Amino acid sequence: MITDNIKNAALYYALNENFKAAFDFLAKLDKNVKTGKYEINENLFINVQEYEGKTREEAKFESHGTYCDIQYMICGREFIDSADVSLLK
């Protein structure tokens, strides 16, 4: 897991061929963006969501084995924990 600022996005372009396109899209967003699914290319989509965050007790861990998940907060706040996936049940 990486926690950083969108201003540093270029540091991560080499990690995945779709990162530049994803970060370019995200950098242009503001609070007026409509929720929904945005197809960027055949291998990249952006889900814009609006929701109330869960408490630490309500939340469940998730992991991704075949794709990358970029969480980008436009406004508000959310607590995110991380753990070694091999330790999760």
Image (tube, helix red, strand yellow):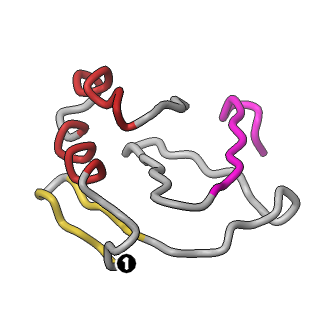
Left or right? Give the position of 75 relative to 38. Answer: right
Is 26 part of what is drawn in magenta? no
Q: Is 67 placed above or below 83 here? A: below
Taking depth in this image into account, of 19 and 9 the one nearest to the observer is 9
The answer to which quarter of the image holds residue 40 is bottom left
User: Where does the image place residue 65, in percent across and percent down from the top left?
Assistant: 46, 42
> Image point 66% across, 35% down: which residue?
85
> Image point 25% across, 60% down: which residue?
45
Check disc 1 and report the residue beneath it.
35
Is 87 part of what is drawn in magenta? yes
Q: Quadrant of the C terminus?
A: top right
Q: Is 75 placed above or below 36 here? A: above
> Image point 25% across, 31% down: which residue?
16
Name the magenta segment's main secondary structure: loop
Left or right? Give the position of 12 relative to 65. Answer: left
Q: Which residues are magenta?
A: 77-89
